[in-house]
Image: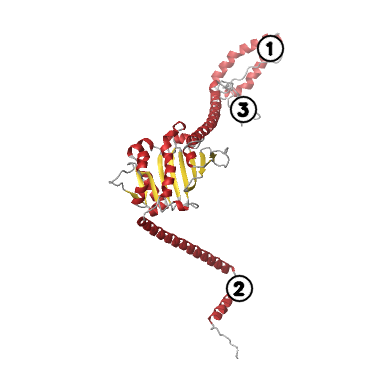
Amino acid sequence: MAIMGHLLTLFLFFSLICLSPILADSDFEGFEDADDVDEDLDSSLPLIAQTLLTSQPGPDPTPKAASASSFEYWDEDEFEGLPQDQPPVVATEENADPKPSETEVAPEGSSSSRSYTVEIACGGFLIIFVINYFTGKRVNENIALAWAAKFATKDTIFDKNFSLLGVGDGDDSPLLLKEGQNVFKFYASGRRCCQGLLATMELKSRHDLISSIFNLVIPTSRDEISFEVYMNDDAMDHVVFAVANNKSAKAMHKELPDLHKFATILSPPTARKWVAHDLAVISESKEVAADLITEAVLDQVFGEKAFQKFGKGFMYMHFSDQHPGPTNKKMLLFKFALPDANSMADMTRLVALIPYYIDLIGRYKLSSQARSKTEAIRSKAAQEAYKELQNARQEALQRKKAERKKLMEETEAKLSAESIRKKEAKERARQMKKAMPKMKMTRAS
């Protein structure tokens, strides 16, 4: 053991000699002072010696790590062969990988919840859309069936005034023709003075969720029914007449060609009863207006008191023998607002106007003085229409000539100089031949 102690002392002595240049040089940046290093070594030598004496001979499995502050920086020129730019890795809480916390997982959860929210909203909208489609479709069908049951079944107004109801010839033919989820049509024929009647119900788009929401916010549409009565050619005299609300009357007079050309908005007369203040009359003459606004109509619908009670759904009626339609010129048009399915009886008096005016217009005849005026106006209108047609034809011909000339100019521009020369020579020859006097040859007798 004494020999081992001497050997250990010699080993420490040579180690101290080898480390002395490093400890002596305190000018290197990052190294501690020499005095501090000596004190550290002196205090550590007895402990190291005692440890080595008491331990078994052999390599130390846990060598003491060098001070982090002593070997923090290296001089590349002085210490060759030593590792460069490899500072000791100190395991700290900052370098250690932090465990994922609940706060870091929260954004993923929130994004997934947001995505689910969008999906749930889309699914809910789709479900509401489907429910609204079938509900609105059913409501529109109920309104149309309620109207048909009130006015187009047995012993009703149309059954008493027309011999054929519905869209077919048999008894089992349907009364209504469904052209859309909110459009229904009804046809009736077999009556004197007219060829037939076509009723078109245009209801709200209740099956469309977007339209329903828009109409709920801004109520612009309502359930309407319009009637077109096709009069016989010999059953309607020269009549251009209309009754509508004050606001609608101005728009109709401005937009409809027959009203704009032949009729004017009449002022209320003072010598007799007239329509309610909310209504305006457009007529070709005062005589026609006075003959068509009868006492019965004023008492039933168009009078002041009757209109307040029974005329809420009235929109307009328009009679014309100069209708701008492509097929029939002589027509009676009616348009009313439809109530709900449980209040169809409220428009009974409005529907009764249709057969009443079919008979009235069918037997109405103008006076000779009024007829002469209307015939003069119609002949003048026919001449103007003929002139407009001729002008349109002339404009079409001029347009075709201009297009043909432009095409020829484009063709000539593409021709070569030789072709142009030949064409000009041919044109000169044709002009000279045309300018030569014509000679008539006679055979000598």
Can residue 362 be seen here? The reply is yes
- Mark 1, residue position: 6
Q: CA distance from mark 1 to mark 2?
A: 129 Å
Give the residue type at disc 3.
Gln
* Residue at image coords 36%, 35%: 309
The one nearer the camera, 87 or 58, is 87
Query: Which callout, 3 or 1, points to the residue nearer the camera?
Result: 3
* 305 left or right of 124 in image: left
Q: Earlier in the sequence, mark 1 or mark 2?
A: 1
The one nearer the camera, 62 or 204, is 204
Q: Earlier in the sequence, mark 2 or mark 3?
A: 3
Task: Report x, y in % for residue 236.
Answer: 43, 51
Can residue 329 be seen here? The reply is no
Judging from the image, what secondary structure is the residue with disc 1 in? helix
Task: Report x, y in % for residue 34.
Answer: 55, 21
Do residues under tags 3 and 1 come within 8 Å of each other at their CB atoms?
no
- Mark 2, residue position: 419
Query: Which callout, 2 or 3, points to the residue nearer the camera?
Result: 2
Residue 279: mark: none
Give the residue type at disc 1.
His
Q: CA distance from mark 3 to mark 1?
A: 37 Å
Task: Report x, y in % for residue 410.
Answer: 56, 66
- Mark 3, residue position: 86
Do residues under tags 1 and 2 come within 8 Å of each other at their CB atoms?
no
